[in-house]
Amino acid sequence: MFYTLAVLLLFQCVGELIALGLALSIPGSVIGMVLLFFALLVSPRLMEKVEESSHHILKHMSLFFIPAGVGIMVSAAGVMQHWLAVVIAIISSTLLTLAITAISMRWLMNSMPPATDEVMADKPSTPSSLDQ
């Protein structure tokens, strides 16, 4: 688990250095996440090492939201002063995320071949509550 945390922190630091060094308006953590994504694609060994302990991190992911929540509470006066902009940003980003997800899902569903009877026969049947 410490190896996974070290890898995550390393990529975040590299992303921050790139963002600061090139004076980019993109957050360093986002750059680090993109770099980590490509590193995981290129290196199956890194993927295996990180995947082993990533389940433990994901199980306790709610702890990672505490600093963000505290930051919002500390700057509550600023948030209240600009409440309309915050509400518009939340609603528009949520709608944009839903739209992009729907478009991506439709594209993926259309790009997959339709399920045949053979494929459906291989799937185990699960009893539903309607069968009882």
Image (cartoon, rainbow, N blue to C red):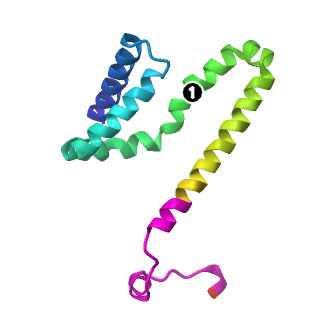
Q: Which residue is mark 1?
A: 66
Residue 69 in view of the camera: yes
Mark 1 burial class by Cα count in 10 Å: few <14, some 14-19, many 20+: few
Q: What residue do we see at 76% from left, 30% from top?
A: 87
Q: Can see residue 132?
A: no
- Residue 1 at x, y = what percent? 30, 36
Residue at 30% over, 24% down: 10
Up/down of 49 relative to 102, above or below: above
With 69 as the anchor, is 44 left or right in this view?
left
The magenta stretch spans residue 126 = yes
Q: Is residue 57 magenta?
A: no
Q: Secondary structure at mark 1?
A: helix
Amino acid type at mark 1: Ile
> Quarter of the image holding residue 67?
top right
Q: Camera-side residue: 75 or 38?
A: 38
Q: Which residues are magenta?
A: 106-130
Q: Residue at x 36, y 43 (%)?
A: 54
